[in-house]
Image (tube, helix red, strand yellow):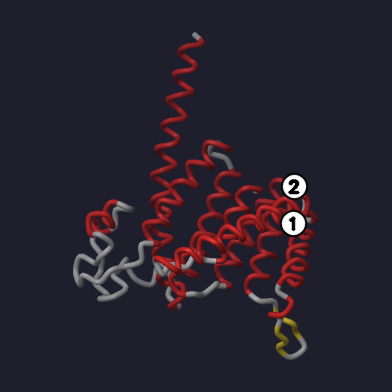
Amino acid sequence: MLSAMQTMQSSYMWSGIIWAIVVGLAIGNYACSLIHRLPRGRLLLDKAPYCGSCGTLLQVKDLFPVISAMLLRHHCRYCGVSYPISHTVTEILLAGLSVLAFLQYDFSDRAILLIIIGTFLTILSAIEVNEKLIMGKVMICVIVAGMILRTYLDHGLFNFVLGGLYGVVTGAIIWYKSITREGHIYRLPKPAELMAMAGICVGAKAFPVFLLLFIISYAAIWVISRLLQKYFRITIPFSLAILLPLFGVV
């Protein structure tokens, strides 16, 4: 009897992992469309999937996550122009995130919210890599999902509101030289806004731990990005320094 139960649990776990990979890859595939379209002012439903270089509509055989990119060596089948490797990285990251969310929280509301936050954070990072741009619209999506998650977990608003305030104050202190004034309003730089976004997602109680992890992550990202720039001319996005510790806390 015990052996049968263990077999059922094992089967459920592996079935869940497979489903999580499939769902994560599908989400990553759609995320890649947003990564290309959002900086150009286009929405996901504006047009069927297309090549960003020649504009040719993509066929089903061109849209298999990871597999199509590997077979085509990250080049368009129709015009031969290469597209960012960050697309494949995005699909793999979100597949991994979905698996981790399932293993830790099963198929639950918390897992779904974590996947949503991770998806938009990954989109944010990929757009920064490709376009050197931190998009406020994507940050708002992360903030909304973070507010829902914290309200769901904390059964109240105080923790995420205070967490956002901690993030604003911390960001203003670290990047105070980059604060600008527009009329009668002072505007924080994007890194400080990212810190406020993270504060909302992790809440006030976990913010000190997040801040410590962020410092470690930022230092590691800074060193790695300098090495990559020297040898490979690749820049690691600043938003990645926020994403990694955020998921270590949330």
**How busy is the neighbourhood of tag 2: few (under 14 within 10 Å), some, or many (20 plus)?**
few
Picture coordinates of residue 184, whole percent (x, y): 77, 88
Answer with left or right where residue 42 lies relative to residue 139: left
Could you tell me which residue is drawn at 28 percent across and 69 percent down?
82
Answer with left or right where residue 132 lies relative to residue 210: left
Picture coordinates of residue 41, whole percent (x, y): 45, 78
Could you tell me which residue is drawn at 46 percent across and 46 percent down?
96
Picture coordinates of residue 135, whole percent (x, y): 54, 72
Q: Amino acid at mark 1?
A: Phe
Picture coordinates of residue 235, whole percent (x, y): 47, 68
Could you tell me which residue is drawn at 61 percent across and 60 percent down?
219
Residue 120 visible? The answer is: no
Q: Which SS class for mark 1?
A: helix
Answer with left or right where residue 172 lies relative to residue 133: right
Q: Which SS class for mark 2?
A: helix
> Going by the picture, which residue comes out furthest to the bottom?
183
Q: Which mark is residue 160?
A: 1
Q: Amino acid at mark 2?
A: Asp
Q: Which residue is mark 2?
A: 154
